[in-house]
Amino acid sequence: MAAGRGVRGVLDALGLGYTILAPSAELAATLIDAVERLHVQLGHQVWPTPQIRDFGGWLRDRHLVRQFADASLPRLLSDIEARELWRAVVQDSEAGKELLEPAGAARAARRARRAMSEYGIPGAALAAYPSEEVRALCEWTARFDERCAALDCLSADRLLESIPDEPVALLWLESPAWRPVARRWLQQHAAGMLLADEVGEAAVHRYRAVSPGAELAAIAEWSRDLVDAQTSARIWVCIPDLGGRRTLVRDAFDAVLAPQRFALAAPQTLAAYAIAGGTPLADFPTVRAALEVLSATNGTLRFETFSAVLRLPQLQPSTADAAAAARIDVLLRRRAPECLTLAEWLTLAERVANQPPVTAAVAVSRLRAVQRRLEGVRGSQPLSRWVAAWVAALEHGPWADRAGWSSGEFQAAERFRELLAALAVADDLFGPRSAASALRIVSRSARDTAFQAQTGIPPIWISGQLHDPWLTYDGLWVSGCDEQRWPPPQNPVPLLPVDLQRRFGIAASGVESQLQLALDLQHRWQSRGRACVFSAADAEDGRAVPLSPLLSASPPLPTSPSLVALATQPHWRTQADAAPVLRSWDDERAPEFTSAERTRGVATLRAQSQCAFRGFAETRLETAVLSRPTPGFNSRERGEMLHDALERIWLVLESSAALQAQGAAELESLIERSVAAALAAQCVRRDPGPRWQRRELPRLCGLLTKWLATEALREPFVVERLEHDAQVARHGGLEFRVRIDRIDRLADGGRVLLDYKTGMALPDWRGDRPDNPQLPIYALLRPQGLVAVAYARVNASDCGFVAESERPGVFKRGGRATHLEGRVSFAALLDTWAQRIERIALEFRDGHARVAPTLRACASCRLQPLCRVPSALGAQADLDG
């Protein structure tokens, strides 16, 4: 018997004291909004809260009310507890031990158990199918019931069985979404049924898009046009695969209805649409930050993890504090080992922050407060103990600034508190847990819990459910209506025999029942919308996907200018359309170098020679690739230790004659002492740990033994200078601080300049734009008597010299002189180098910043996001290939 029709009927029923039951929380929310809108239209300023509930939520509330009156009633399991209990039951069973994904089996078992309850399938009927899946389901269900009984708990799918037979003032919405058991109960106990309004003759059309992205863009454009034409318009959009395309849907609707959200400083404004269903609670910033901070308190952390936690926006009260945290992060990258505990990371960060000009960061103090509030809770503890400690820690860490949160941030954090509270009352279920185990439960629960901040129901409502919206709308659009998905393909409930599902009326288990459901829904949709559109989209690869034959009688949607040539990335298209017309201007000249600026020594001229833009960016814009701690010593640190050890060795030996006079044991002892001293000096700057020190000592000793054997083959020499301090080279009116590794004097007074290289070494100083003018710069600083310059390649695979020399045999008996870039003597070559370096220095001083890389420059450059030259990327790809 029908008790009324439409929103007016709902309002009348509420005035008589009835509670209205809806089959889903989404429909209940939209109906509440419709009732409140009607109150406003009627001129009401105050009205009672509408008693409109989804059926499951109403059953839970009824059980809680009964518990207040009778404390002996079993406690109701929360969704989190039920998920974890099913997971434990499956994992502990014999069948579960053989499964690759027990969590997926637990979800399937829970769904099957719920379907049996909703459709009234008795256990005896299930037992008549002796398959392996059915036996597993029966075993898991029995164990689940045993665990519930032992815990004195009740699962949600048993609520309807336990509700007492007493009169209640109920009305229910007519809808095909009701399951048979719930429908029979309502028919017996509710006072009546509310019918939906119908709009009469609807304008029905079909639309076929060239791609899924174009389909979303068309829906957004059509929705906006309806809202623009009628400010009071209400629109319902159904996107069946919403769960997998939520981000794309949001982008498409933002492009049309809220394009300001794509700006760098997006304002927190409400859009004219809302997406139903919610996203995982763990994805909301306040919750994600809480989980990351709590996870950081367990065990050791890699630097990347600590760096991300240190820079969390929720730990920074201001932009100045965020900058301080970033500066500490940069310094830690140079000094930190790869892994430490949170307490050790914070101690190192505090030490770095005490060195001017770095200032203390609030993030460090807040993380320290979190760590201290958790350090007293150790070992295995009940979840209630962990939850109490976590909440206290969060309030001193990522939740310390909650007074400045937006409504959405506050709601997400409060929902997370509710989740933690639900876990805190489940000590009997979970038992004592370690911190890591407890956090895994919390993280899993936050991922499995969908949440949506409450902002009211806007004009456009986007749903992912194929159901009757019940309310009437000015526009209604259903997407995904191609021949493959409409009617929906059969989708039986896992673990339940398909024949059994069909016997008890589970629509998704059969093709015929899905066809009947599709026809019924299609009729209802056409009755609910004054304008109704059914759409489909061709595949992303361009493959044609025809519309469903059920829509053949509908005419195509009339095309408007806004629906023509829609792009697959609508938000980028909207940004391009809104952008002003720009006039291109190539600015390749920076301001002249000023006295207030400083060069970076050889690195400045090297970058300027390779690419003028790189020289400008690296020195004057101070762009740099952030380093990061690695296991053991990195390549730079190994190079520094090698330089240090060789300097110590030659301070003792002083000449090739002394090297050759050394006995094997003496030389081995000298090398070991020098390496140990270099290693100790490096560990003062950054200590990766004793394990890596023990590895590095024999490696470097072996390498230097091999290198000194190579040096013994040279023409006799005396080490004349080992550069301890940097010197100043002047070119183009600028100063460049440089440090020469070593200068040797030969028997005839000629001098040789050496620079140690631990990696690959090539004669990269040649040409008008050398890739590395390092040796020419050093040579011009010490030109007196110079006959050769060389990279000393101290490499485990191939020790040797890469040289420029005017005489043979300097570096190896029988060796040859080089061609000196076609010059007649080394002195003439020095003149050429002087002109070349002066020109490069003048270009840098005058602000030349043209993007024009040499052939190999892009292979070692990471500025492509700034220079944006395709040739640069192509050159790097060619070199890498």
Image (cartoon, rainbow, N blue to C red):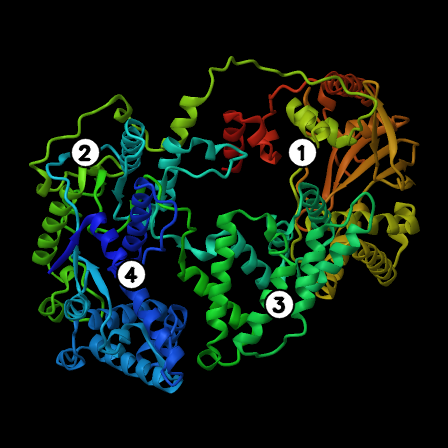
Q: Residues within 10 Å of mark 1 (few under 14, many from 20)?
A: some
**Pointer 4 residue:** 54
**Pointer 2 residue:** 207
**Which residue is at 22% across, 48% downward?**
8
| Residue 97 at x, y percent in the picture | 35, 77
Report the side of 48 relative to 563 (left or right).
Answer: right
Q: Earlier in the sequence, mark 1 or mark 3?
A: 3
Q: Earlier in the sequence, mark 4 or mark 2?
A: 4
Question: How far is the residue under mark 1 from the one under mark 3?
Answer: 34 Å
Whether residue 469 is visible, yes or no, is no
Report the side of 4 relative to 87 (left or right).
Answer: left
| Residue 663 at x, y percent in the picture | 87, 59
- Kind of element beneath mark 1: loop
- Can you tell which quarter of the image residue 836 is in? top right
Q: Amino acid at mark 1?
A: Thr
| Residue 811 at x, y percent in the picture | 79, 38
Q: Residues within 10 Å of mark 2 (few under 14, many from 20)?
A: many
Q: Earlier in the sequence, mark 4 or mark 3?
A: 4
- Can you tell which quarter of the image residue 253 is in? top left
618 or 48: nearer the viewer: 48
- Kind of element beneath mark 3: loop
Q: Earlier in the sequence, mark 2 or mark 3?
A: 2
- Kind of element beneath mark 2: strand
Q: Earlier in the sequence, mark 1 or mark 4?
A: 4
**Pointer 1 residue:** 623
Q: Amino acid at mark 2?
A: Tyr
Q: From this view, report whether residue 470 is shown above or below residue 560.
A: below
Question: How far is the residue under mark 4 from the one under mark 3?
Answer: 44 Å
Report the side of 707 relative to 272 (left or right).
Answer: right
**Pointer 3 residue:** 299
Q: Amino acid at mark 3?
A: Gly
